[in-house]
Image (cartoon, rainbow, N blue to C red):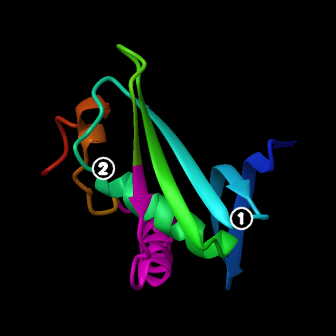
Amino acid sequence: MRRNGFETEFEVSIDLNNLKLLGHVDAYNPDISTLIEIKTSNKIPEAPYTEHLLQTQVYKVLTNSKQSYIIYISRSDGKVRVFKVEDGKGVLKWAIERAKKLKEALTIANIPNPERSHLCNYCEFQLNCWR
């Protein structure tokens, strides 16, 4: 779907040998080569969360965007904060390697190494995690 020049909520992917890296872009305007990722949060952070930054940088590469932004919207008061996202050196290579490790772990039914994030607080396995 396209609104106000932006294509919204669409899939981007890259196919590699027996591996597919897949994501869902919130909004992209090809006319101005601009990517937007929208995040809701109880409290707007002072800087983007690392995982949001990496996600947006990968999407920026996959859409070949010239500029990208993360927009945080506060659930509690509706305030908005916009962060411009710079290119991430080697971010696509990092994402591919990370996906390969996860696929390998799942293939041999081995628990992958945990990755610390703010989402750990919501994980049902947090008591079993060595983090």
Magenta span includes 88: yes
Magenta span includes 24: no
Disc ID at residue 32: 1
Q: Disc 2 marks which residue?
A: 49
Tag in front: 2 or 1:
1
Q: Amino acid at mark 2?
A: Tyr
Mark yes or no: residue 66 visible: yes
Query: From this viewpoint, which residue is outermost toward the left?
Result: 130
Which percent across, then down, holds residue 111?
34, 58
Which percent across, then down, holds residue 42?
32, 23
Look at 73% across and 57% down and name the residue there.
Answer: 29
Region in magenta: 83-110
125 on left or right of 95: left
Q: Count neighbours of disc 2 (C-alpha within 10 A) and say few if under 14, some if 14 to 19, many if 20 or more.
A: some
Look at 42% across and 63% down and name the residue there.
Answer: 85
Considering the whole magenta stretch, tell me its main secondary structure.
helix
Q: CA distance from mark 2 to mark 1?
A: 25 Å
Q: Amino acid at mark 1?
A: Ile
Tell me whether circle 2 and circle 1 mark residues in contact (CB < 8 Å): no
Task: Note whether 36 is above or below 90 in the view shown.
Answer: above
Task: Note whether 31 is above or below 6 in the view shown.
Answer: below
Earlier residue among tags 2 and 1? 1
Task: Note whether 129 is above or below 79 in the view shown.
Answer: below
Query: From this viewpoint, which residue is outermost toward the right?
Result: 1
Instruction: Tell me the element at label 2.
Output: loop
Picture quadrant of residue 119: top left
Look at 13% across and 51% down and name the residue there.
Answer: 131
Look at 26% across and 57% down and name the residue there.
Answer: 115
Which percent across, then down, holds residue 89?
39, 84
22 on left or right of 131: right
Disc ID at residue 81: none
